[in-house]
Amino acid sequence: MRINSNRIHEMEPHKKSTHGGAGRGQGRKTLSNDGEPLVSLNSSVTAAQKAKFREHLGSAWLRAAIDAAPVTEKTPGKTS
């Protein structure tokens, strides 16, 4: 009950809002066909290198270049 202007009113039952809430299925999707999740990769480059990256279609070009590169054996103790 609610008292307002010396009157007693019955409160209406709470109605569920149709706005807000969880946004399931939103956000970046995985790009690989096998469902492998994407990870972020950051790198420092010159302005000219950044322009070249964008000219070559950005991320799609980079992923193709990485996939085409030969796999090399890691040397113990080296990080690159």
Image: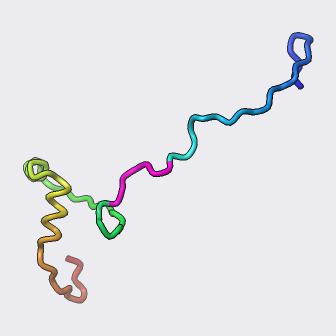
Q: Is residue 9 above or below residue 60?
A: above
Q: Is residue 74 magenta?
A: no
**Residue at image x 75%, y 33%?**
14
Nearer to us in this view, 6 or 35: 35
Residue nearest the observer in this picture, 37 or 77:
37
Name the quarter where the C terminus is drawn: bottom left
Q: Residue at x 55, y 46 (%)?
A: 22
- Horizontal and vertical percent position of residue 70: 12, 78
Residue 75 is situated, as x and y percent measured from the top left of the image, at: 19, 88
**Which image quarter is the N terminus in?**
top right
Residue 45 left/right relative to 38: left
**Rendered view: 32 above or below 10:** below
- Where on the picture, by quarter, is residue 4? top right
Q: Nearer the viewer, residue 44 or 63?
A: 63
- In terms of secondary structure, what is the magenta stretch mainly? loop
For residue 36, side relative to residue 67 (left or right): right
At x 29% / y 65%, what residue is drawn?
32
Segment colored magenta: 24-30
Q: Position of 6 compared to 75: left or right?
A: right
